[in-house]
Image (spheres, grey):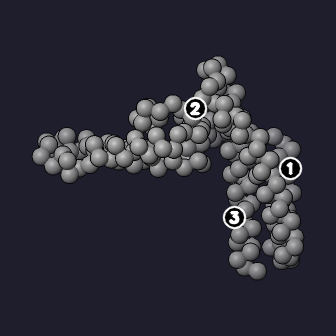
Amino acid sequence: METNYFEFYNLPETFQPDEAALKRQYYALSREYHPDFHATASPERQQEILNLATLNTNAYRTLSDFDLRMAYILGRHGLLEEGKQELPSDFLMEVMDLNEQLMELEFEPDSEAAKRVEDEVNALTQTLDAGIEPVLVGYPGLPPDARPQALRQVQTYYLKKRYLLRIRESLTKFAARS
């Protein structure tokens, strides 16, 4: 089992960590595991220090980024495995509709239609963000038996955001061409 980044930084598992504490831990460990301070150590210890320095960098990179952190937590709980991801059919229908509008834009570029799709994606994103906020805020305080339900809500949010991101990327490509 790989190292738990939250335990590595001595922080609770949370979707909204204390950014200052995270940065302090990162800098403290960066100094502690800096290879220059271990130049006279045995080759084995130098390799161990190098591994810890790499772990520190990877942990910070992951935990300091909202989307990477969310994927990391969901992954740790086995919620990003292929075939275990179902989204509500009403959302899939909305996405299908947006994708059809994008396909129409491919054949008939129309900046007003593109703007409507973009506005729809933005509205969906804002609704998603507002809906998940209380779950993200409340997660650390949940009793262990209530966490799986919260994690499933976060999983649904994360997957929906990925869909919307792909639509946004398609819109960006369309905008670049027109």
Category of crowding for the residue at label 2, using alpha-carbon neighbours closer than 10 angstroms: few (below 14), some (14–19), many (at least 20): few
Q: Residue furthest front?
A: 20
The residue beneath circle 3 is 169
- As drawn, is 98 to the left or to the right of 59? right
Q: Residue at x 46, y 40 (%)?
A: 21
Q: Residue 85 at x, y = what percent?
A: 69, 39
Count of number-bearing discs: 3
Q: Is residue 135 above or below residue 130?
A: above
* Structural distance between the alpha carbons of marks 1 and 3: 19 Å
Under mark 1, the amino acid is: Met
Residue 51 appearing in the image: no
* Structural distance between the alpha carbons of marks 2 and 3: 28 Å
Q: Is residue 9 above or below residue 168?
A: above
Q: Residue 96 at x, y = what percent?
A: 83, 55
The residue beneath circle 1 is 93
The residue beneath circle 2 is 77
Under mark 3, the amino acid is: Glu
Judge by depth and name the residue closer to the eye, 61 or 141.
141
SS for dot 1:
helix
Q: Residue 23 at x, y = what percent?
A: 44, 46
Judge by depth and name the residue closer to the eye, 62 or 81.
62
